[in-house]
């Protein structure tokens, strides 16, 4: 049974997505129960394989359509033509993030999205979004990757445009769809270059044959830059605030993980497709690292400065998503820059690997605290009927739970101990300092501005006298919304209190999966 | 997994959140005890003490400085930067995609120049 887990992780939510219109006719509660069971099953399966994949370092392969899917070792094939799924430490790490945030978003949606028959469409799209994320995180096939990226993009665009009380969701969805279409077109061009060169889509096979010639390098640019845009790296980030601010709150939380799936692909291609630092003919890792570092530093600084002056609560948080992506790019960029340094790997072992550990740990932390913050923004916007911070006041009197959840998320994103944001940021600060003190100082300054920005939101929305006349929705906070925020609150606190457990169990195996060659 | 500890210790970077929480809790307990012993007890919830005073304004909505007025000095000091940045975020998809094309072109120049 365990050998079928890679395909089950994709097939179960995919099957559920297409069965939901039929199940929805039986009853709304049955439909909701099925979705909940699917999400719990996916989470269970991912946690179930932690001992084997993350702790024992085993890589799970699944050859789709083979009589014995795990019998063939794809790397031993001369010319692999089948679609191969591959779960290593990094794909497992990303899969867990996607599945946990999807569960929280679903619980929150139960009360946030109007519960009628149309909600089946919402849940179908939510399932397809999860399928898209898990698919591109688990696949070892470039064309398959493109297909799952398209599944993810289309479902995201439709969910952004899902009918809510927001002002212009259809236009935001259209914008997301167009941006995604252009990005994936470039991506397909890069994949086409690879296929033309090596006659295969299998990543392990291409990696083993990689020549690092001009065509390969052009393919890398066509694949990596669109992924950076999908991840929200500056100066290609401008769609992020426009889209995140219009989407329903639980969808925005999922959009964060969708963007991080693109970031995953960027790192995966940099290492698992092109990574070969000991080869005499190789890409210049120092230059590639500095490109990623530059994108990261610009994202951090411009993201946070733009967030600081926003009056729209969701737009402010969206700019912070851009800013936090910068930390991940900075950490991994430093790792890449020293990956193939001429010192025989001593700088990589001294601080490059730690910077990557911090950057990758920050992906998980960011998904949880930013997901939490977007969920709290849903409560704020629903209560006041506006996203304008100028028209909010004193919500803490009414929604103490939301206020506490917001404080936890805000302190985590600002990197205040003992929350999870600090644990990953300290790894980034200290390791990046050894690479370039200036970059580390910029990262710390950005954290200060982040705190200032969230103090502004807390002051505007939660503090001040109680004003019931400004509250549009006076109903008590439903259990589902509390549960969605509660799960992420607990994770933010636990990851902050026990960072070493998570780093040893999930983050280090993820880093090791990327840098096996070194 | 055998190397898991409750403190973070990676190549010279050390951080123990549990110790911080214990120290923080101990300080809070000390402040509480000290407060019970020596703080004044003249606070009364049912008097005008609890009402905010803001230079004579009586409308409650005027008690709060609005969020758009916060950090105005920062915004004013960087007004040139913000004018340009807000110009870039104009909602026009053509302009958004232009940046991706520029970055792709720059990277291709790096490739063709042998820098990557």
Image: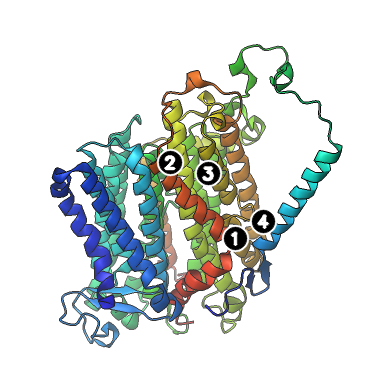
- What chain letter is assigned to the residue under label 4? A
- What chain letter is assigned to the residue under label 2? A
Q: Tell me the CA gap for discs 3 and 1.
A: 17 Å
- What chain letter is assigned to the residue under label 1? A
Secondary structure of the residue carrying tag 4 is helix
User: Where residue A241 is drawn, which disc sits there?
Assistant: 2
- The residue carrying mark 1 is A497
- What chain letter is assigned to the residue under label 3? A
Secondary structure of the residue carrying tag 2 is helix
Measured as percent of width and height from the top left, residue A362 is found at: 52, 60
Marks 3 and 2 share the same chain: yes
Residue drawn at x 35%, y 62% is: A43
Q: Nearer the viewer, mark 1 or mark 2?
A: 1
Disc nearer the start of the sequence (4/3): 3
Q: Is residue A517 above or below residue A170?
A: below
Secondary structure of the residue carrying tag 1 is helix
User: Where residue A441 is drawn, which disc sits there?
Assistant: 4
Disc nearer the start of the sequence (4/2): 2
- Give neighbour class at mark 2: few <14, some 14-19, many 20+ (Cα, 10 Å): many
């Amino acid at each position: 049974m365990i050998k079928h887990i890679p395909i089950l992780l994709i097939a179960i939510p995919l099957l559920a997505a297409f069965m939901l219109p039929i199940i929805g006719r039986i009853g709304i509660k049955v439909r909701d129960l099925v979705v909940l069971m699917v999400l719990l099953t996916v989470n269970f399966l991912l946690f179930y394989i932690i001992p084997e994949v993350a702790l024992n370092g085993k890589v799970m392969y699944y050859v789709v359509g083979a009589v014995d899917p795990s019998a063939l070792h794809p790397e031993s094939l001369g010319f692999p033509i089948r679609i191969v799924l591959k779960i290593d430490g990094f794909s497992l790490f990303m899969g867990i993030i996607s599945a946990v945030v999807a569960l929280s978003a679903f619980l929150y949606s139960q009360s946030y999205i109007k519960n009628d028959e149309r909600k089946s469409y919402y849940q179908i799209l939510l399932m397809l979004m999860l399928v898209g994320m898990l698919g591109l995180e688990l696949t070892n096939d470039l064309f398959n990757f493109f297909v799952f990226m398209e599944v993810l993009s289309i479902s995201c665009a439709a969910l952004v445009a899902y009918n809510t009380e927001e002002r212009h969701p259809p236009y935001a969805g259209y914008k997301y769809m167009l941006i995604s279409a252009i990005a994936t077109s470039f991506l397909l061009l890069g994949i086409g270059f690879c296929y033309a060169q090596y006659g295969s889509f299998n990543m392990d096979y291409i990696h083993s044959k990689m020549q690092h010639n001009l065509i390969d390098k052009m393919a890398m640019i066509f694949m990596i830059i669109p992924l950076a845009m999908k991840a929200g790296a500056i100066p290609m980030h401008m769609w992020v605030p426009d889209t995140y601010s219009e989407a329903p709150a639980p969808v925005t939380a999922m959009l964060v993980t969708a963007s991080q799936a693109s970031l995953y692909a960027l790192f995966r291609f940099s290492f698992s497709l092109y990574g070969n630092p000991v080869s005499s003919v190789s890409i210049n890792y120092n230059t590639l690292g500095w490109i990623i570092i530059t994108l990261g530093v610009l994202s951090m600084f411009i993201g946070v400065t733009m967030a600081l002056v926003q009056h729209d609560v969701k737009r402010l948080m969206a700019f912070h998503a851009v800013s936090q992506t910068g930390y991940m790019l900075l950490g991994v960029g430093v790792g890449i820059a020293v990956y193939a340094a001429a010192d025989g790997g001593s700088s990589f072992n001294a601080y490059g690997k730690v910077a990557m550990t911090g950057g990758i740990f920050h992906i998980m932390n960011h998904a949880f605290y930013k997901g939490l913050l977007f969920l709290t923004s849903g409560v704020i916007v629903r209560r006041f009927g506006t996203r304008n911070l100028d028209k909010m006041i004193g919500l803490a009197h009414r929604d103490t739970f939301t206020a506490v959840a917001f404080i936890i998320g805000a302190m985590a994103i600002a990197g205040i101990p003992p929350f999870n944001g600090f644990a990953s940021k300290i790894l980034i600060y200290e390791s990046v300092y050894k690479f370039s003190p200036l970059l580390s100082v910029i990262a710390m300054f950005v954290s200060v501005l982040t705190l200032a920005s969230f103090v502004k939101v807390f002051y505007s929305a939660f503090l001040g006298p109680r004003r019931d006349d400004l509250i549009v929705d006076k109903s008590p906070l439903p259990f589902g919304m509390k549960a969605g925020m509660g799960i992420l609150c607990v994770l933010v606190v636990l990851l902050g209190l026990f960072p070493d457990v998570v780093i040893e169990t999930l983050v280090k195996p993820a880093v090791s999966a990327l840098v096996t060659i070194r | 997994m055998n190397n898991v500890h409750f403190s973070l210790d990676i190549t010279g970077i050390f951080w123990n959140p549990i110790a911080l929480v214990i120290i923080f809790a101990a300080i809070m307990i000390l402040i509480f005890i000290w407060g019970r012993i020596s703080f004044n007890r003249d606070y009364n919830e049912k008097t005008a003490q609890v009402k905010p005073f803001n230079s004579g304004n009586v409308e409650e909505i005027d008690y709060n400085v609005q969020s758009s007025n916060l950090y105005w000095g920062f915004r004013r000091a960087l007004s040139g930067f913000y004018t340009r940045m807000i110009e870039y975020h104009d909602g026009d998809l053509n302009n958004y995609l232009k940046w991706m094309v520029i970055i792709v072109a720059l990277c291709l120049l790096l490739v063709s120049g042998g820098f990557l």
